[in-house]
Amino acid sequence: MAQVVKNNNEYKYKLDEVTKKNKKVEKVKTEKKKKVVKDNNKKSLWDKFMIFCHGVKDEFKKVHWTGKEKLIKYSISTICFVLFLSVFFYLINIIFAAIQALFA
């Protein structure tokens, strides 16, 4: 018999031989419940905005920005790919129009 218990003793998971074979897990709630703690110190709108701005600034520091050389390389390859596809579909359109003209 195996038991796994969470740190706050909120749930217990019991496995025995029968449930192992059936791959079933019973979830048993314990009598302890989490106490809900409310924050009575409400922050002003300006404080919330400043916290948000600091969070955005911290996230921008984590972003890996592409270098100038790679950015130019990727931009040129993207433009070439778009031009190739536009010419390809233009030629396909001309071919289908010619085929349609033969049967019409």
Image (cartoon, rainbow, N blue to C red):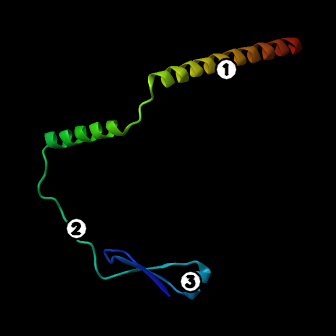
Q: Quadrant of residue 34?
A: bottom left
Q: Locate the C terminus by quadrant.
A: top right
Q: Position of residue 37 (x, y in %)?
A: 19, 65
As drawn, 28 above or below 87: below
As drawn, 50 above or below 101: below
State which mark lies toward you, 3 or 2.
Answer: 3
For marks 1 and 2, give the CA distance.
59 Å
State which mark lies toward you, 1 or 2.
Answer: 1
Instruction: Look at mark 1 in the image and give the residue it sits on.
Output: 85
Circle 3 crowding by C-alpha within 10 Å: few under 14, some 14–19, many from 20: few
Is there a contact, CB below 8 Å, between mark 3 and mark 2? no
Q: Is residue 104 left or right of residue 16?
A: right
Label ID, residue 36:
2
Q: Quadrant of residue 52?
A: top left
Q: Quadrant of residue 23?
A: bottom right
For marks 3 and 1, give the CA distance.
58 Å
State the residue at coordinates (54%, 24%): 74
Q: Position of residue 47 (x, y in %)?
A: 15, 42
Instruction: Look at mark 3 in the image and give the residue it sits on.
Output: 19
Circle 2 crowding by C-alpha within 10 Å: few under 14, some 14–19, many from 20: few
Between disc 1 and disc 2, whose residue precedes? 2
Identity of the amino acid at label 2? Answer: Val
State the residue at coordinates (59%, 21%): 77
Q: Please tell me whether mark 1 sits on a helix, a strand or a loop.
A: helix
Q: Position of residue 36 (x, y in %)?
A: 22, 67
For marks 3 and 2, give the CA distance.
34 Å
Between disc 3 and disc 1, whose residue precedes? 3
Is there a contact, CB below 8 Å, between mark 1 and mark 2? no
State the residue at coordinates (33%, 74%): 7
State the residue at coordinates (14%, 39%): 46
Label ID, residue 60:
none
